[in-house]
Amino acid sequence: MLLPLAIAAGIDLYLTLLFLGAAPTTGLWEQPLPGALGDLDSPGVLIMVGTIYLLEFAAERYAPAALVWNAFHAIIRPVSGMLLTLLVLDGQPIVIIVAGSIFAGVLSSIAHAVRSGGAVIRWLGIGTTPHVLLVSLLEDALVLGIVALALDLPVWAFATAITITVVFSPRIPSDVRAFAFAVRLAVGRVFQTLTQRRWLGPEELPAWVRGSLKDDDVLVPGGALRGSPVGAHRLPGSPRFVTGWVLVRGGSPVLVFRRRRSVERLVLGRFGAEDVLEHGFFRRVDLRTSEDSFGCIFFGLNGPSAASLRAEFPAD
């Protein structure tokens, strides 16, 4: 049961706890819950968990509130996954409890990052996306199904959890990067009044970015080198979502990002700029990557101004 319950807790912790606590009272499961999971049926626990679940459901209707909530739960989810393991493995040898707790904590953290990162990409991105309420209901249905299967048919629940992990594993790096980048955007929003909106000079670039300019054959000579940290979504030749730097030196802007152990560069001038969008948390440059496809680049509010971005990315 540990694998499916850890994934369910990472996706929706409070619904998982609420279901586990209420399951014995439904009459559908006559056998006692394994370990000490039966302790969750306390009325006080159910009221508290149910209240927090409603708060989460309300907070995630709005992107800024959802970002703050999920950033805070980046710490809560793994800890809760570990505590849930203590209940499941109650009475087992200490070695098994410790190993299971670490495993469940890591898995819950990854599941939370993938789920939250996917939500961030839908918020940041362009184009039509499912309504947030529909996404929440689908997630809740998935969690209820996993937990019910874990209580009734643990082997099938384990197989389902493995399948979910395999299916979503290609998305893990991009979703985790998107979540981390969104947290940086929120921090930048808080401190935007304390810093000047500008490009950063050569001496302020990270060492790996400066190192990518050696023997440069991409950037056009001339002009002052400047850059800004960015996130990029759906650009050809890069992962689904990637974080890196946009560099400008007298020519077409270039996206520099890390992939595995190498540093790669993507010339952005070959994409047609559509518009520069001003948002309360970021500035977004929309690029036409093909006849019917779009990508976008996100700059923090402490980065270059919208006017400066329009100068570097003139609309076609």
Image: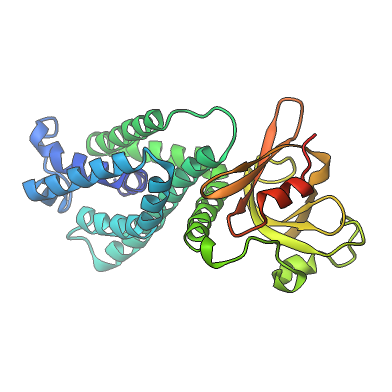
Vertical side of 168 occupied by 145: above or below = above
Determine the residue positioned at 39% across, 28% down.
134
On screen, residue 86 versus residue 238, left or right, reads left
Vertical side of 203 occupied by 303: above or below = above
Residue, far top: 292
Residue 293: quarter of image: top right
Residue 185 drawn at (x, y percent): 53, 55
Determine the residue positioned at 56% across, 53% down.
177
Residue 223 drawn at (x, y percent): 88, 62
The reply to whether residue 127 is in sight is yes
Vertical side of 20 occupied by 141: above or below = above
Residue 220 drawn at (x, y percent): 90, 56
Determine the residue positioned at 47% across, 41% down.
119
Residue 315: quarter of image: top right
Q: Nearer the viewer, residue 132 or 76?
A: 132
The reply to whether residue 258 is in sight is no
The C terminus lies in which quarter of the figure? top right
